[in-house]
Amino acid sequence: MKPSTIAKDRILEISPPNIVIEQSRGWASLGLRDVWEYRELLGYLVWREIQGAYRQTALGVTWLFLRPIVNMLLLSFVFGTMVRVPSDDVPYPLFSLAALLPWGFFSNGVLRASRSLVDNMHVISKVYFPRMIIPVAGAASGLYDLAASLVILIIAMLIYRTPLRVEILWLPIFLIVALGFSLAVGLWLATLSVKYRDVSFAVTFLLQALMYMSPVIYPVSIVPQAIRFIYQLNPMTGVIQGFRWSLFGSGQPPEITFLLSIGLMILALVSGAYIFRRTERTVVDIL
Amino acid sequence: MNEHAIIAENLSKRYRIGRRIENHRSTASGLQKLLSPFAYLASTLREPEAEEILWALKDVTFSVRRGEAIGVIGRNGAGKSTLLKILSRITEPTSGRAVINGRVGSLLEVGTGFHPELTGRENIYLSGAILGMKRAEIDRKFDEIVAFAETERFLDTPVKRYSSGMYVRLAFAVAAHLEPEILLVDEVLAVGDAAFQKKCLGKMGDVATAGRTVLFVSHNMVAVQNLCSRAIWLDNGQIIEQGETHQVVAKYLSLGSQALSEQIWPDKETAPGNDRVRIHRLAVRPENGCPGDPISMDTPIVVEVEYWNLLPDEIIHSCLHFYTEQQVVAFTSAPIDSHPEVAQNAKQVGLYKEVCCIPGNLLNSGVHRVLLLMIRNTSKIVYRMEDSLTFEVLDLGDRAGAWYGKEPGFVRPILNWQVQRIE
């Protein structure tokens, strides 16, 4: 053995990881370093979420594609053809798809994150790892839905011969906001779901309400000026607006209120993370 | 270098148990319940009252030296699992603290994180990651894990199609290759077939002799005595005794299972029963001993039932149902089995005693619960007592070829075999 290796071994022996276990008080740190240490597990959990869900289904991962397609067709038929909702001169299928993409990403993320703690109870009660990974994996698994919807969007844009715009480079920003918001809502709901199973009933209802309060089926332009300000505090409004603007140049680019809504989102995210940390210490005792 | 792997100081854990719910049957209370839908919300927000509090662990202080194997023994609900959960950081203590020096691997269950729809190969990675292994580490040990589990052929089969034995083997194999500096183990060994259990214990022994620290929670005195040099005896969340394993185990065996080996009700008016029959005394003991003395598998057991018969000319007798830990009736017995005349001879008012003798080498090891029935006219149950007695049959591992695990089955008789060469 080379002398250098011996020295290294000795250092490792002298300073082993020293874990102190005691009741944490007050606002402890978020423990993000711990989460980073376990990043591989995060990857596995996201992968398991999708792999596990679609095994032994006849259509398999096709479901990921089927959902946005069917949603798009339904919305186009009901709201585009029958109700004739204005769509800022963009073909309604494209108009709805541009909204369904971030919305599906957001709502699937919220749904999975909110029930993640209860669903993974058997694991949580038997082994330690930073619990934060579980809702994060739930929210991040929306990326699969996103990838599938993106493929459909590209095909649809090819069919409608939509020209590509430089503004498309803004899309990642809007996606990050959507991910942040879904994680924020997901963390809050996951924390609440530990004590109150009411959350599982409330979450679908909440998502439905939020969908009507976001410009998924209609353009922002028909929202009355009087409530426009409050309406735009919803981060998803800016996200969907931004998607349509950067993809087709339709409607307005997100206004200054979008920044305000991002601020609110960050507030919800940080507070959600802290409230989650406070609960995670004793989550096993309550569930 | 710090010579202690685990130092626990005054570890305490308080649990909040639900408030006792009175048996409301009236419509009024039902209505009341309907009208206050937020009762649950209110109950979670207020401070728990004294009667709702359970100390699962109270002021537990001990230390484990590096490289030492320590056993934690005690009855069900003594706080063993709570201690493990705190040390493996699954839950936090209410007060007190513990310091752990080294990488911890905890095995509280076999197959943590397995997903039934995924294949064996996928589950090795998933479960390994959940237990804290890095991908590179799993890659390196993959072949070893597969060989240990003996499931090469089924690597790409979803684990839900595995037999329970295969499932357990694979799950344990992943955990066994964790190679932590400190291993916390709950009674995961109570699964799998005999050969595999031996292999698991062998692997654990390797861990212990390789200079790593092991904290082993078990009911299995034989395994504890063989694997651990020191032991801690927990009861009601407190340490009763700690020290050298054989001393602690001996004390535990002599005092530990006293719980319901004898019950006496001296007063005929308040004794359990009804206006036909009241129970005076119940006891279970080894044939040549007192209630509370240890009962091992080869000890003949005596169960005594004393009762007051309160009505004249009654044909009445007791009947015992012996339940296993799985809450399955192992067998039933009544005096009329051996004395048919009991079914005809009417009893007068008075105190009666009925004694049941269970031969040694009949019951398998484990905790047995006795249900007492008082039977009138050989068929009608006039009184029923659920937890009349409990006793534990201990496996002292003194049979030839004994192994550490529990053999399956309700009974464990020694039968007469003939072994000969016929060709």
Image: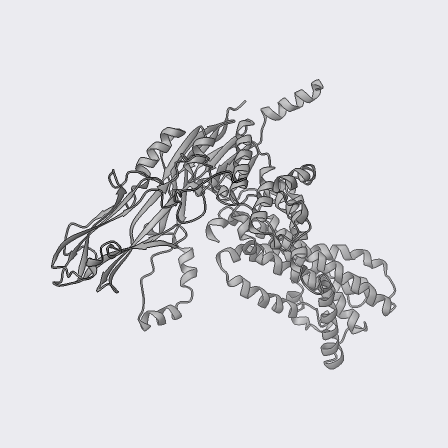
- Residue reaching furthest to the front: B423
Using residue A152 as the reference point, say whether residue B96 is left or right of it.
left
Residue A7 in percent (x, y) is at: 66, 20
For the N terminus of chain B, give its image quadrant: top right
Residue B324 versus residue B203 in the image, above or below = below
Using residue B274 as the reference point, say whether residue A172 is left or right of it.
right
The answer to which of A64 and A164 lies nearer the viewer is: A64
State the residue at coordinates (75%, 63%).
Answer: A149
Q: How many marks?
A: 0
Res B179 quadrant in image: top right
Residue A48 versus residue B86 in the image, above or below = below
Residue B390 in percent (x, y) is at: 31, 48
Residue B31 in percent (x, y) is at: 36, 72
* Residue A36 is at least partly visible in this image: yes
State the residue at coordinates (64%, 24%).
Answer: A9
Using residue B311 as the reference point, say whether residue B1 is left or right of it.
right
Q: Which colour scheme is used?
A: one colour
State the residue at coordinates (71%, 72%).
Answer: A217
For the C terminus of chain B, give its image quadrant: top right
The answer to which of A269 and B380 lies nearer the viewer is: B380
Residue A236 in percent (x, y) is at: 68, 62
Residue B25 versus residue B101 in the image, above or below = below
- Residue reaching furthest to the top: A3
State the residue at coordinates (68%, 47%).
Answer: B153
* Residue B112 is at least partly visible in this image: no
